[in-house]
Image (cartoon, rainbow, N blue to C red):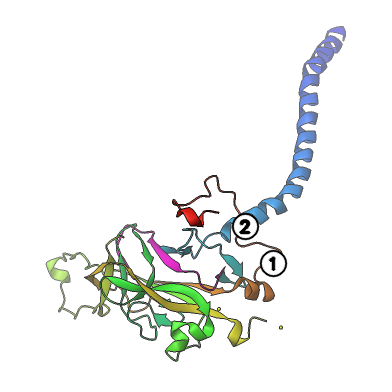
Amino acid sequence: MIRKQQSLQLFLKILTPFVLLLRLMIIALMFMEKKMKKWIPILASLVLASITSIAGAGQLAAVSIINQSTGERLPVWRHQGNNYVAGKPGERYAIEVRNKTGERILSVLSVDGVNALTGSTASQAQSGYVLGAWQPVEIKGWRKNMDEVAAFYFTQLSDSYAARTGRPDNVGVIGVALFREYVVPAPVVQPEYERMAPTAPIAPAPAASGIMSKSAESRAEKADTRIGTGHGERINSAVRSTDFQRASSQADEIISIRYDSYANLVARGIIPRGRDVYPAQPNPFPGGFVPDPGHYR
C-alpha cells in the first residue's frame, strides 16, 4: 500500500507541469480567438481596399488609365460592380493594356462608344491592337495614321469627339474587348478501322486586321455636366499592320472602366466625400528647367 501511494504521488508530480502547460495553452487560444474577432473585419477591409486599387484587372489583360502629365495611374473606385476613375477636364490621358498571357491577344478599344482605331461606332468585330506575349502598350489617342494619334483628353461633354460626331449616348466609358488567337489544332492519327468519311473542318472566326505597337461618365446625371474624351493635338505613335486570326467571334473577355469628374462621382456616391483623389505629395526636387532671367519666381 505504501509503495502504491508513493508511486501515485510521483505520478502526480510528473503530471502537474503538463496540466499547467495545458491550462496555459487553453488561455492563449481563448485570447487569440478574441483578438481575431477584432482584427478580421479590419483585415477584410484592407483586402477590399487593395482590390479597388487594381484598374480593370482581367484574366487576359490589365487595363489602366494613365495621367499623361504626371505618369501616374488614376485610382479606380469600385461601385455596384463597375470600375470608375475621376478625370480632370483638360488633362491628357492614355489607356494602358497589358497582356497577362504568354500568347498574342487582340484588344479592340472603345472610347465613349467609338472605336479608337477606326473612328466607327464600336463593335467587337472591328480591328484593334495586337499585343505580343506579356506586352504592355499605351494607347494615347485616336488613330489618325500609322504614325500619329490625336491625343485623348478629358473635356466637357459637348467638346467630346463622340458628341461632335453625333454620338453622345455612350460618353463616359472605356471598353476593351479581348480575343485569343486561333491556333490550328494538331493532327490526330486514327487507326485504319476507325477512319470515317472526312467532315468539313470548323471554320475559325473571320480574320481581323490588327495593329502592333512598336513601342510597345443639383447631380451628375445631367448631361451637360458629364465629361467625355476630346480629339486633341496630334502626337507621334508609330505602329505597323499585322495579321490576327480570332479563336472566336465573341470576345473572350471585356473590361470596362467608367469615368466622370471628381465632383460628379462624389455627388453620385461613388467616391466618399472628403476623399482626395489626387493627394498632394512632397517633391524633393520641385524645380524644372532653367528659366529665362526675367521669368524666375
Q: Which amino acid type corresponds to the residue marked 1 in the rendered image?
A: Pro
Label 1: state its secondary structure.
loop
Please identify the quadrant where the C terminus is shown: bottom right
Q: Is residue 170 visible?
A: no
Q: Which residue sits furthest front?
A: 294
* Figure label count: 2
Q: Quadrant of residue 81?
A: bottom right
Taking the image as shown, residue 248 lies to the left or right of residue 1, namely left
Quadrant of residue 10 in the image? top right
> Residue 272, labelled with which disc?
1
Looking at the picture, tell me which residue is in the foreground, 131 or 273.
273
The residue at 60%/67% (across/down) is 78
Crowding around mark 1 (Cα neighbors within 10 Å: few <14, some 14 to 19, many 20+) is few
Residue 220 in percent (x, y) is at 64, 81
Q: Position of residue 276 (x, y in %)?
A: 65, 61
Nearer the observer, 268 or 134? 268
Residue 100 visible (yes or no): yes
Please tell me the numbered disc located at residue 279.
2
Tell me where residue 31 appears, x and y as whole percent.
78, 39
Image spot of residue 47 (x, y percent): 61, 54
What residue type is disc 2 on? Pro
Label ID, residue 220: none
